[in-house]
Amino acid sequence: MSAFTPVRTPGRLLHAVAVAATLFAVTSVFMAQSAVAQWKWISPAGVVQYSDLPPPPNIPRKDILSKPAAAPMRANAPAASAASGPATAPASASKAAAQTQATRELQQKLEQDKRAKEAAQRLQQEFDAQTKQANCQQAQRQLQTLDSGVRLAEVDAHGNRAFLTDAQRAAQRQQAMAAVANFCR
């Protein structure tokens, strides 16, 4: 008989579920942020800028790379962008509604991620409990075999059978008792 060997736990399952849930959450955050950013232009410093607001008046039209589908191109005059009144109220209301919707979607995706992590933890705990029970049963069987008084033998690397001495049996019994104490709580 060989010494006790515990059953190995495949921790990769929990790791894969956690990685997938984390990637989903991160992707969701970036998707929600990119859905709000509708304008794209090159700043005077040569950096590409993204915003849900139109670029500043000092940006020439040729440097505006993209704009919202419903937004008209602005004139380069500051007076056009500074206009206020009843026409700007619906635009700010729709912007607030879009931000509220994006916030709700982000919160839902974060809750889904949290539920997925909790489910993965429950699954890992169940798997660990089953593994511990299997290790306990294996250690108890090993201890029963060693206590049975039957003459036990091991096969060496050359294929020869060698019977256990009393000292070897006592050492294996100590290992089996330690395994029972560890796994059978």
Image: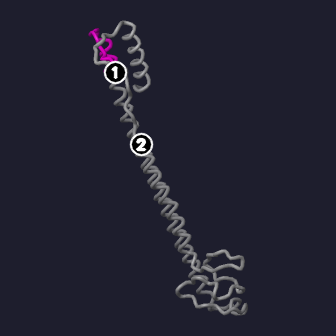
Q: Magenta span has 145?
A: yes
Q: Which mark is residue 124?
A: 2
Of residue 90 and residue 69, the one placed in the foreground of this image is 69
What residue is shown at x 68% (from left), y 78% (from top)? 43
Q: Position of residue 33 (x, y in %)?
A: 56, 70
Which residue is nearer to you in this view: 134 or 41?
41
Specify whether 102 is left or right of 134: right
Image point (41%, 22%), residue name: 179
The amino acid marked with disc number 1 is: Gln
* The furthest residue to the front: 158
**In front of the other: 126 or 159:** 159
Helix, strand or loop for disc 2: helix
Depth order, front residue of 185/36: 36
Q: Is residue 6 left or right of residue 34?
A: left
**Residue 14 drawn at (x, y percent):** 43, 46
Q: Tell me, yes or no, whether the highlighted magenta stretch contains residue 146.
A: yes
Instruction: Report crowding for label 1: few under 14, some 14 to 19, many 20 or more residues within 10 A (C-alpha).
Output: many
Residue 134 position, x and y percent, is: 34, 30
Magenta span of residues: 139-156
Query: Rounded to the nearest whole Å, what is the CA distance between mark 1 and mark 2?
Result: 24 Å
Vertical relation: 126 (above or below) 18 = above
- Residue 174 position in % (x across, y down): 42, 15
What residue is shown with label 1? 140
Q: Secondary structure at mark 1?
A: helix
Q: Which residue appears at 53% of the width and 88% of the height?
A: 70
| Residue type at the position of mark 2 | Gln
